[in-house]
Amino acid sequence: MEEKKIIYCVDDESSIRELYQFALTGAGFSVSCFEGGEEMFAEVKNRIPDLFILDIMLDGADGYEILRRLRENVETREIPVIMVSAKDTEIDKVKGLNLGADDYLSKPFGVLELVARINAKLRKKDSRRKTTYKDITIDDETHTVTVSGQPCAATVKQYRLLKLLVSNAGKVLRRDDLLDSVWGENYGETRTLDIHIADLRRILAPSEAEIVTVRGVGYTLK
């Protein structure tokens, strides 16, 4: 049985949250609705969804600010985001798209159109479920790591850490960003990261790629 896709929806109107919950659950998705961004980000630490739906006009941090934070996070920057708003001006759409949104819907919207937009974004996302760099392949569908054509055993934390490095190959990832993304903000002992990096280096021993330490900053995969 295929696992349900996970959708996170943020809207400060209870009627809209109820609509999302009813309509998207009926369409076969696993849906979690939040009144504001902080509630949603707290849940993101526990589980990464397949797609976000963000209202622009919110109390506190608006949808643009939430989108900016999602795109700055190495674990959520590639997750599709659909912006929703009663605003219907070109400048609002352009602002969201320039910040990294994947789509924009104006209120009021039809449920069938919303589901169709979600499915279109998820199909595009699913076509990129394999992340590769040189001879390393990360397959999210089977949750496996392949190095030089050979499958490699990896723990959940090792898998997530390696995926971040492969997805951002050539870029320097800061220690704090890696710790926040893989272990959460209350990660405690930072030595944990160094131990996991050492484990990944052993896993990648047959590979053409290597994890390089950038002193005082973090790590990069080259």
Image (tube, helix red, strand yellow):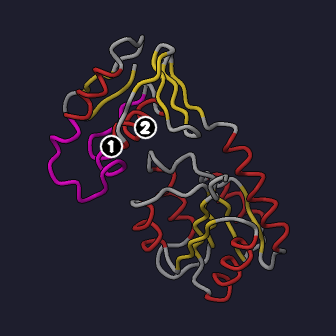
Reply above or below: 59 against 199.
below
Amino acid type of the residue that numbered disc 1 sits on in the rendered structure: Leu
Q: Residue 150, labelled with which disc?
A: none
Q: Is residue 74 left or right of residue 21?
A: left
Helix, strand or loop at mark 1: helix
Q: Where does the image place residue 59, in percent across and percent down from the top left?
A: 51, 82
Q: Indicate yes or no whether the magenta region holds residue 180.
A: yes
Whether pointer 2 and pointer 1 mark residues with C-beta atoms closer than 8 Å, the reply is: yes
User: What quarter of the picture does the C terminus occupy?
Assistant: top left
Look at mark 1 in the image and give the residue it sits on: 178
Place of residue 76 in the rendered image (x, y in percent of width and height, measured from the top left): 50, 51
Q: Is residue 162 left or right of residue 64?
A: left
* Quadrant in which residue 112 is drawn: bottom right
Q: Is residue 204 magenta?
A: no
The magenta stretch is 171-194
Badge number at residue 164: 2
Q: Position of residue 89 (x, y in %)?
A: 77, 69
Q: Nearer the viewer, residue 68 or 5?
A: 5
Instruction: Give residue 216's position: percent from left, percent from top.
Output: 19, 33
Residue at 60% x, 78% y: name it: 11
- Element class at badge 2: helix
Q: Quadrant of residue 204?
A: top left
Q: CA distance from mark 2 to mark 1?
A: 8 Å
